[in-house]
Amino acid sequence: MPRSLSFAIVLTLFATFSAAAQSQESSAPPPQASSQDATPPAEAKKPKKVWTNENVSSATGTVSVVGDPKNQPKPPSSKPTNAQYVASVRKQLEKLQGQIADIDKQLVDPKKFSEGEPSTSASGVKLNKRYEREPIEVQMRALQAQKKDLESKVDALFDEARKKGVESSQLR
C-alpha cells in the first residue's frame, strides 16, 4: 500500500509541475514584429527585359541571335600535334593492351576449370608454376581487377591525348 501511495504522489507532482510550466509558456507575450519585416523584399528591384520581334530593332548594344554566323563559337585551332608525343602514347597503349591480352589468356584456364572442362595446356600440369592455395574464384577476381585497372589506365591515356588535341585515329 505505501508503494502505490508514493507512486500516486510522484505522479501528481509531475502533472502539477508540467501544467505550471505550460501555463508560464502560454502567458508569455508574443514576440513583437520587427521593423525589418514591415519593409518590402529587395527582390522587386528591376524586372528583366524580354525582347520580342517588334522591339529587337530598337535594342542598343549587341544582341545574340541563334544562327548568326558572326556570333558562332570558333572551332578549336587545328595546331599540328607533336609526333613524338603521339608515338610515346601509342607505345604506352600497345604495352597496356598487351598486358590486358596476357590477363585474358591467364583467365582462360581458371574459367574452364570452374566450368569442369579440361585445361588448355597439353598435359594439364604446369611444371614451371607453383601450387596455388587460393580458390579459383579468388584468382579470377584478382585477374579481373588487374584487367580493370589496366583498362582504366588506357582510358586515362586516351583522355589525356584527346585533351592535348590528338585524335584517337592517330593512336591506333
Image (spheres, rainbow, N blue to C red):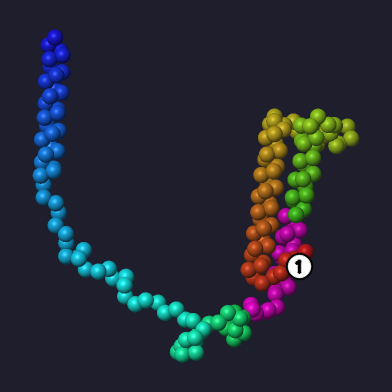
Instruction: Please give the name of the residue rendered at 16% of the width and 65% of the height, measured from the top-left corner.
Output: 35
Chain part drawn in magenta: 75-96
Instruction: Please give the name of the residue rendered at 67% of the width and 48% of the height, measured from the top-left corner.
Output: 148
Say above or below: 116 vs 43. above
Q: Which residue is mark 1?
A: 169
Closest to the observer: 123 or 118? 118
Instruction: Please give the name of the residue rendered at 49% of the width and 86% of the height, measured from the top-left corner.
Output: 54
* Quadrant in which residue 144 is drawn: top right
Residue type, numbered disc 1: Ser
Residue 56 x/y as whole percent: 49, 86
Furthest residue to the front? 54
Say above or below: 74 vs 134. below
Does the stretch in magenta take in 37? no
In the picture, the quarter occupied by the C terminus is bottom right
Q: Is residue 164 left or right of residue 16?
A: right
Q: Is residue 102 left or right of residue 49?
A: right
Instruction: Please give the name of the residue rendered at 28% of the width and 71% of the height, measured from the top-left corner.
Output: 42
Say above or below: 152 vs 89. above
